[in-house]
Amino acid sequence: MRTLLKLLGDGEFHSGEDLGSALGVSRSAVWKRLQQLQAETGIEVHKVRGRGYRLASPLFLLDEQVLNRSLNELGWSTQVYDSIDSTNAQAMRLIDGEVALPILVLSEQQTAGRGRRGRKWVSPFAENVYYSLVMRVEGGMRQLEGLSLLVGLAVVSMLRELGIADAGLKWPNDILVGNRKLAGILLELTGDPADVCHVVIGIGINVNMRSAAEVDQAWTSMMQQVGQPLDRNQVVASLSRHLHRYLGEHREKGFGAFHEEWEANHAWQGRAVTLLAGSTAIEGVVVGVDTVGALKLRIGDQVQVFSGGELSLRLRDESASG
């Protein structure tokens, strides 16, 4: 399937004869493979008599060899899958294996992608980036404080490098353009966070996504923002460089060194919000975050601090999903 996708990836017409010759199969076998491709991936293939076959739009497949070469200087290795349940789940499975860490897990598609609070992460084939970096963490809780917020800074830095100047952060781990979600972060831990543990940094980025009826909140993609499809290998390489730099500085300085930078990039800084904690709704104004990444809200005349994985933030003056 990957060979066929590479042949069609330019978005141009290719005759059944040419495709069959490249694949070493008959024209009828090409048609059967194209039908299978559409069924397995959801990718739309156009057939025009006398011209051949083309994809509805160009396709940029992830290239494991290219990525390993570009990320070698970071000391990371990369595994790329065509389809997997979840890159975070696979990263967790690798912890018990005999593989050198850090290792980056990517997939063209997820069949059970996860977001925060048990939400499904919609994962169409070869359109977005499904990214999970697994690494060993030593030195106790200080190495984990504010980590998801720090990852958000790395994502925003990548987006701005690639031409999306309006990207901003939403506490605790969403990346927005306006009030539309472009990316999300999900961290998962195993082991003893007070001593030695492993952390999986999961990042989902809408890169070339065109439609997503299953998504239950306002969203956008990098392609929508820049006006043309992007090479997802370039997105992964840029994100990895920024993430590597931020992680290195975080190990030395802790999140406190970044909390002002994070506040400067917080899209909802100073906004009136509702904080949802289970069935409880708390109204306040965003003051910022503290030196370990907890949210500070002004509630009446007091500033209160909130942290925890089940909290969700919504704007009070606009419709916005948490």
Image (cartoon, grey):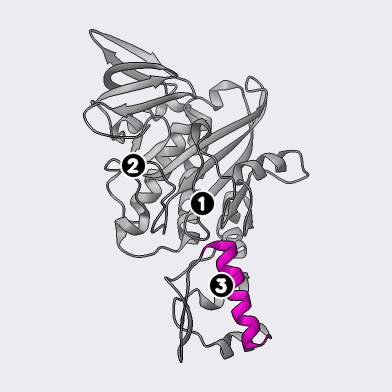
Q: Amino acid at mark 1?
A: Ser
- Split into 4 quadrants, where in the image is the C terminus? top left
Q: Which residue is mark 3?
A: 5
**Residue 205 placed where, x, y %?**
45, 49
Quarter of the figure that contains the N terminus: bottom right
Q: Secondary structure at mark 1?
A: loop
Crowding at dot 2, Cα within 10 Å, few <14 / some 14-19 / many 20+, comes out as many
Q: Position of residue 193 (x, y in %)?
A: 63, 23
Element type at marker 3? Answer: helix
Residue 49 versus residue 270 in the image, above or below: below
Between disc 3 and disc 2, whose residue precedes? Answer: 3
Q: Which comes sooner in the sequence, label 2 or label 1?
A: 1
Q: Earlier in the sequence, mark 3 or mark 1?
A: 3
**Residue holding disc 2:** 176
User: Which residue is the site of mark 1?
Assistant: 123
Using a 10 Å C-alpha cutoff, classify the residue at mark 1 as few (fewer than 14 neighbours), some (14 to 19) or many (20 or more).
many
Question: Which contiguous range is marked in magenta?
Answer: 25-42
